[in-house]
Image (cartoon, rainbow, N blue to C red):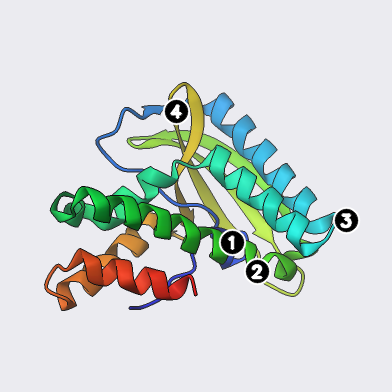
C-alpha cells in the first residue's frame, strides 16, 4: 500500500485531515475559524520550537490532534464506501489503527520542524466549511501554502481538511485506500492488516 504523509508529516504544511461528509458538521463563522487556526498554529510552533524532550513534544502534539480533529471522521471519510462493508469489529479496529498511524506520522517527525514559522491569511466560506489560509515555512525549505478547512462539530471548531499546495489531504488519503482496496477485492481486513504493519 502506498504510504502518504498525513498531517504534520508534510512539514507542518500537511497536518491534519478530514471529517466524514454527511455528519452533523456545521460551517464555522470566518472570524471564529481564523482565531481557532491562529491559536492552533501558535501552539504547534511553540511545541516544536520550544524546550522539552522529544517524548514531551510528542505527547503535546497528540493532545492537540485529539482536541482539534475528528479522527473518527477522518477514518470514515478515508474508507469511503468500504466503511459500510466492514463489520462492527473491523470498523473499530480500523479506526484505532488509523489513529495510531496518524499519530506516528505526526509525532515521529517532530524533530524535523525546529524553526518553523507561519503567517496567517484570510478566512472565507466554502461549501464544506471555512477555509483559513496560511503560509508555513521551515528553515531551508520553500514556504508552503496551506488552507485549513474548519467546521463546527458538537459546538466546537474542528479541522475537517487540509489543502497543502492545492492538494486535499483527505481526498489523497481516500484515493490511496480506495486503490489499495480495489487491488484487494474490497477486503477491508487486508487494509486493517496493512495498517497494523505500519504501526510496527
What secondary structure is marked by label 4?
A: strand
Q: Earlier in the sequence, mark 1 or mark 4?
A: 1
Q: Name the residue that disc number 3 marks.
A: 51
Q: Residue 6 location, x and y as percent?
A: 48, 62
Q: Earlier in the sequence, mark 3 or mark 4?
A: 3
Q: Residue 136 location, x and y as percent?
A: 66, 57
Q: Earlier in the sequence, mark 4 or mark 2?
A: 2
What secondary structure is marked by label 3?
A: loop
Q: Are marks 2 and 1 in contact (CB under 8 Å)?
A: yes
What separation in Å lies between label 2 and label 3 (alpha carbons)?
Answer: 16 Å
Corner quadrant of residue 191: bottom left
Query: Which one is nearer the viewer's eye here, 90 or 10?
Result: 90
Q: Residue at coordinates 17% horizontally, 78% vertically from top-left?
A: 183
Mark 4: few/some/many CA within 10 Å (<14, 14-19, 20+): many
What separation in Å lies between label 2 and label 1 (alpha carbons)?
Answer: 6 Å
Q: Residue at coordinates 31% horizontally, 56% vertically from top-left?
A: 78
What secondary structure is marked by label 1?
A: helix
What separation in Å lies between label 1 and label 4 (alpha carbons)?
Answer: 23 Å
What separation in Å lies between label 4 and label 2 (alpha carbons)?
Answer: 29 Å
Q: Are marks 3 and 1 in contact (CB under 8 Å)?
A: no
Mark 2: few/some/many CA within 10 Å (<14, 14-19, 20+): some
Q: Name the residue that disc number 1 marks.
A: 106
What secondary structure is marked by label 2?
A: loop
Q: Name the residue that disc number 2 marks.
A: 109
Q: Residue furthest top?
A: 155
Q: Earlier in the sequence, mark 3 or mark 1?
A: 3
Q: Name the residue that disc number 4 marks.
A: 152
Whether residue 177 is situated above or below residue 170 in the rendered picture? below
Q: Is residue 150 left or right of residue 54?
A: left
Amino acid at each position: 500500500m502506498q504510504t502518504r504523509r498525513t498531517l504534520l508529516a508534510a512539514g507542518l504544511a500537511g497536518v491534519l485531515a478530514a471529517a466524514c461528509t454527511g455528519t452533523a458538521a456545521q460551517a464555522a463563522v470566518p472570524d471564529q475559524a481564523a482565531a481557532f487556526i491562529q491559536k492552533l498554529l501558535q501552539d504547534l510552533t511553540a511545541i516544536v520550537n520550544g524546550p522539552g524532550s522529544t517524548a514531551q513534544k510528542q505527547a503535546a502534539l497528540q493532545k492537540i490532534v485529539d482536541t482539534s480533529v475528528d479522527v473518527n471522521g477522518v477514518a470514515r471519510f478515508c474508507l469511503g464506501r468500504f466503511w459500510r462493508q466492514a463489520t462492527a469489529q473491523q470498523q473499530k479496529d480500523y479506526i484505532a489503527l488509523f489513529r495510531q498511524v496518524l499519530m506516528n506520522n505526526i509525532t515521529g517527525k517532530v524533530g524535523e520542524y525546529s524553526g518553523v514559522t507561519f503567517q496567517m491569511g484570510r478566512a472565507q466560506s466554502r461549501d464544506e466549511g471555512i477555509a483559513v489560509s496560511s503560509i508555513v515555512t521551515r528553515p531551508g525549505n520553500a514556504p508552503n501554502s496551506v488552507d485549513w478547512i474548519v467546521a463546527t462539530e458538537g459546538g466546537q471548531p474542528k479541522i475537517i481538511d487540509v489543502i497543502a499546495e492545492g492538494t486535499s489531504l483527505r481526498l489523497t488519503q481516500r484515493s490511496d485506500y480506495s486503490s489499495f482496496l480495489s487491488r484487494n477485492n474490497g477486503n477491508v481486513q487486508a487494509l486493517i492488516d496493512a495498517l497494523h504493519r505500519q504501526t510496527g
